[in-house]
Image (cartoon, rainbow, N blue to C red):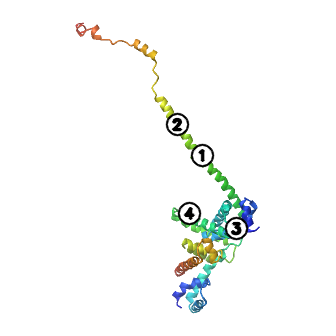
Amino acid sequence: MNCKTLHKELIFFLEGDLPLEKREQLEAHLNECPDCAAFAADIKKTLQVTENEKSTEVNPFFYTRVKAKLENNETQHIAAFENVFLRKVLQPVLFSILLIIGVYSGIKIGQPAPVNVFSSTQFDQETVPYLNEMETESIETFLME
Amino acid sequence: MSEAEIIEQLKSGSEPAFKQLVENYQKLVVNTCFGMVHNKHDAEDIAQDVFIEVYRSVRKFRADAKLSTWLYRIAVNRSLNFIRDNKKRKWFQSFEDSVETKTKALQNLAATKSDQPGFQLENQQRAVLLHEAISALPKNQKVAFTLSKYEDLSYSEIAEVMDLSVSSVESLLHRAKKNLQKKLYRCYKKKCL
């Protein structure tokens, strides 16, 4: 057993995953090699951290917080539904109605005004006849003056 | 109240049954989440979401599976989602922010364990080192290792939670330990502590 082999197998040795024969070989090497023994001690301490971290105490307010979060989520869920209904249903309906009103009024405004027959005859009667000035006063008469 | 009774009453929306469920399985869920995210506050937050999901989807629960297996699955999935979202957020964080977050994590660790006289600075550094090494593991290895170390689950229980064969779990744990040892040896050589 050399240091390189030990470095490959050490974690399995510390976790108790190795067969007896291999374990004995590693133990023998660790007794002989102070460098490997120091590394083994270091890794053992680091792996021990998980044991210290396991929570043994129970948070007394945990259930209250879960309950509050659950109620809060439900309110948010309803608010989100209302928001979606407002955005995805009401808004398009409103815009469609506005568009239809706009198009309808545009068509109505664009239509020509109805022709009034009575006023049209009046207009004909009132038209001033074209005045030909040359007939009333010729250019010669104008220049002679 | 037995497990089956809790489930039955939960299906009819009973609040005392929900309270009983939370009290019975709180430690299991928080520990699993902590093993994945390595932060007490985040782990409790995720655990709360786990119980909310259980409350909402208890009707889908099949009686042939164990309740604890179902809880482990939800806890693991929620924790993995949290880690994924956190990674995305960190990607957009500046360097200063990430340094600040690391310092805060160290301070939190010191604050939470300061009441324990045996827990010293060296242990805090070891904890940070081990958390970084576990976090760097591939997803499946991380899940298998966490369930084995933080929850002391057997290979067959891990296999049930992860929906894998026992031999796959053995292989995952073997590779996880090998990867961890590599990282810890590299750090030992560089004298990180």
Q: Earlier in the sequence, mark 1 or mark 2?
A: 1
Disc 2 chain ID = A
Give coordinates of residue B46: x percent, y percent: 64, 64
- SS at circle 1: helix
**Subunit of mark 3?**
B
Q: Nearer the viewer, mark 4 or mark 1?
A: 1
Nearer-the-camera pick, B78 or A8:
B78
| Rendered image: mark on residue A86 | 1
Q: Residue at x 45, y 17 (%)?
A: A117
Element at badge 3?
helix
Q: Earlier in the sequence, mark 3 or mark 4?
A: 3
Q: CA distance from mark 4 to mark 1?
A: 29 Å
Label 2, label 4: how far apart the Cα atoms are? 45 Å
Are discs 3 and 4 located on one and the same chain?
Answer: yes
Position above or below: B16 against A25: above
Q: Chain of mark 4?
A: B
Circles 3, 4 touching at the beta carbon (< 8 Å): no
Badge 1 density bin: few <14, some 14–19, many ≥20, Cα 10 Å: few
Callout 2: helix, strand or loop? helix
Q: CA distance from mark 3 to mark 2?
A: 58 Å
Label 4 element class: helix
Residue under numbered circle 3: B26
Q: Position of residue A9 (x, y in %)?
A: 55, 85
Q: The residue under label 4 is which amino acid type?
A: Asp
**Mark 2 or mark 4: which is in front?**
2
- The quarter holding residue A128 reads top left
Same chain for mark 1 and mark 2? The answer is yes
Separation (CA) of disc 3 from disc 4: 24 Å
- The amino acid at mark 2 is Ile
Q: Which residue is mark 2?
A: A100
